[in-house]
Amino acid sequence: MEKYPAKILVAFTETIDGNKKILDWLLENGYPELAALSTAIRGSDEAVNWLIKNGYSRFAALDAAITNDQKAYQWLKDNHFDLLIILADACRGKQEAIEWFNKNGLQIFTRMASIIKKFVDSQEFDYHKMSF
């Protein structure tokens, strides 16, 4: 993710909140992998499959690691995707990861992690919300 310009990372972060206009812009302007990652984080298996088929397995693994999939997390480690490991940790609220981003001037990732965590936490299963 470190290869993307800051404005693209900001745009990606906005899509996590469901900004369809920016999602479409990413798709139309050479960043389909970020659009797919956003859609995967929002729960699309189709997007995960697209990431894998199109050479972005690291983003599919990030999506899984964000929700604490230990195999995906280990795959990121084994393949030396250090920034994505730290991002997955930050998305799970690990203070050490958040502090690392802030200390290294990468606050865009702190904001990204916060938005992703907020979205993922809102998707947790709650039996009170079950429809019968």
Image (spheres, rainbow, N blue to C red):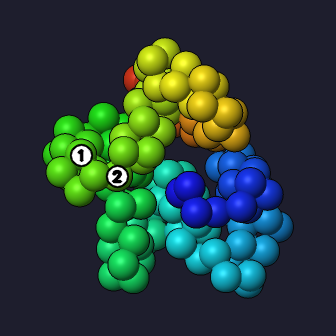
Q: The disc labelled 1 sits on which kind of residue?
A: Lys
Q: How many marks?
A: 2
Q: The disc labelled 2 sits on which kind of residue?
A: Phe
Q: Quadrant of the C terminus?
A: top left
Q: Residue at x 60, y 23 (%)?
A: 103
Residue 77's place in the image compared with 21, above or below, is above
Question: Is residue 118 in sight in this rendering?
Answer: no
Residues at discs 2 and 1 in contact (Cβ within 8 Å) = yes
The image's mark for residue 77 is 1
Q: Badge 2, how many Cα within 10 Å: few under 14, some, many 20+?
A: some
Label 2's element?
A: loop
Q: Residue at x 64, y 63 (%)?
A: 4
Q: Is residue 91 left or right of residue 71?
A: right
Q: Position of residue 29 (x, y in %)?
A: 74, 82
**Along the viewing direction, whichever of 30 and 40 lies nearer the viewer:** 30
Q: Position of residue 44 (x, y in %)?
A: 46, 62
Label 1's element?
A: helix
Residue 27's place in the image compared with 76, above or below, is below
Quarter residue 94 falls in: top left
Q: Residue furthest top?
A: 95
Q: Residue at x 36, y 45 (%)?
A: 82
Disc 2/disc 1 C-alpha distance (Å): 6 Å
Q: Is residue 115 left or right of residue 2?
A: right
Instruction: Identify the residue under disc 2.
Output: 81
Q: Position of residue 20 (x, y in %)?
A: 76, 64
